[in-house]
Amino acid sequence: MKVTDRIASYVEGMTRSAFEADQMRVDAVIRNLQIIGEAVKHNPPIHPAASLIPLSVP
């Protein structure tokens, strides 16, 4: 299971207030976001030519 899928499963069907009231669930989401952040930091830099690719549709 991907980290993003785990995060989605932790919050699925919850209201924001219910999520915020569940400290264990909040901690689990935060931890998985930290895992994503660490993975991004350790990826090699994107090739300079990648900046020529539009990242949004006009």
Image (cartoon, helix red, strand yellow):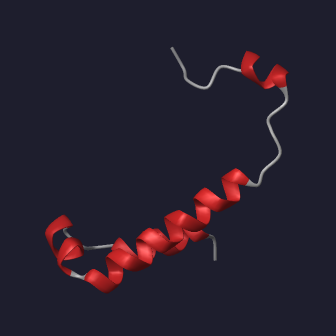
Quadrant of the snapshot with the N terminus? bottom right
Left or right side of 30 for 14:
left
Please state the total of marks drawn on the protein image.
0
Above or below, comparing residue 31 to residue 24 in the picture: above
- Please say whether residue 1 is visible from this viewpoint: yes
Q: Quadrant of residue 21?
A: bottom left
The x and y percentages for residue 29 are 42, 72
Residue shown at 78% from the left, 51% from the top: 43
Residue shown at 21% from the left, 72% from the top: 20
Residue shown at 33% from the left, 85% from the top: 24
Q: Quadrant of residue 2?
A: bottom right
| 17 and 48: which is toward the camera | 48
> In this view, which residue lies farthest toward the bottom?
24
The x and y percentages for residue 51 are 73, 20
Left or right side of 42 for 30:
left
Residue shown at 54% from the left, 65% from the top: 34
The x and y percentages for residue 28 are 43, 79
| 52 and 32: which is toward the camera | 32
Above or below, comparing residue 34 to residue 46 in the picture: below
Q: Quadrant of residue 55?
A: top right
Left or right side of 29 for 16:
left
- Please say whether residue 4 is visible from this viewpoint: no
